[in-house]
Amino acid sequence: MDLGAVIHSYGGPVLFVWAWLQGEAAVIVGGSLAARGYWPWWAVWLFACVPATLGHQIYYALGRRFGEPLLDRLPARMQPAIARARTLVRENAVRVMLVMRFAYGIRLPLPILCGAVGITPLRFLRYNALTALVWALLFTWLGYVYGAAAGAALARVAHYEAWFLVGAVAFGLSVAVLSQRAGSRLT
C-alpha cells in the first residue's frame, strides 16, 4: 500500500471531516503528517480552520434562531443556571468568545448561547475566525513537533508507517465512539 498516494488522494477530505467531528486529534495527526512531508504545515493549519469556524458558525446560527425558545423549554430546575449563563455571556461576551474554542466540555453550547443572547453575527464571526486560526495553529504545531519527534524515534520501523497511521485513526475513532457512549450514559 502506497501511503503517500492514499494521503494525497483522500487526506484532505478525511482531515476536513475528522477535524469537524473530533477536532484536536485530527489537527494533531495532520500536523504530524506535515512533519513527515505529506503536506505543508500551513496547509494543515488553514485547512483545519475551515471546519472549526464553520462548525461554530452553524451552532451560533442555531442558537440565534432556536436558542431562546429552546432554553425556555428546558425544565424549571435548570432555569436559574440558564439565567446565570445568559448573564455571564452577555456581560463577558468578548472573554467568552475568546476562550470558547478551548473550553472543553462546554465548547458546543457556548456558540449556541452566544447566538441566543444576541451577539451580532459579524462580531461573532470575527472572534470565531480569530480563535479558529489560533486553535488550528496551536494543534498543527503540536502535531508537527510530535510527528518530527516520532519520525526520529520510529525511524527503525518506518516500513510499518501505514499500519501506525491506520492504528492512530482507528484509536481516535474508538475514543470518539466510546466518549459519546459514556456521555450519553451520564445524561
Image: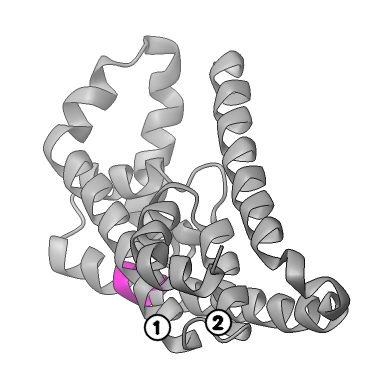
Residue named by callout 1: 43
Whether 53 is among the magenta residues is: no
The three-letter code of the residue at mark 1 reads: Ala
Q: Tell me where residue 85 appears, x and y as whole percent.
A: 42, 40
Whether residue 94 is visible here, answered yes or no, is no
Quadrant of the snapshot with the N terminus: bottom right
- The region drawn magenta spans 128-132
Question: What kind of colouring is applied to the model shown?
Answer: one colour
Residue sitting nearer the eye, 185 or 91: 185
Q: Tell me where residue 128 appears, x and y as whole percent.
A: 32, 67
The three-letter code of the residue at mark 2 reads: Ala
Residue sitting nearer the eye, 179 or 133: 179
Give me the residue at 82% from left, 84% from top: 152
**Prevalent SS, magenta region:** helix
Is the Cβ of the residue at disc 2 closer than 8 Å to that at disc 1? Answer: yes
Marker disc for residue 34: 2
Outermost residue toward the front in this view: 1
Image position of 112 (left or right of 154) = left
Give me the residue at 38% from left, 62% from top: 10
Q: Assign a secondary structure to mark 1.
A: helix
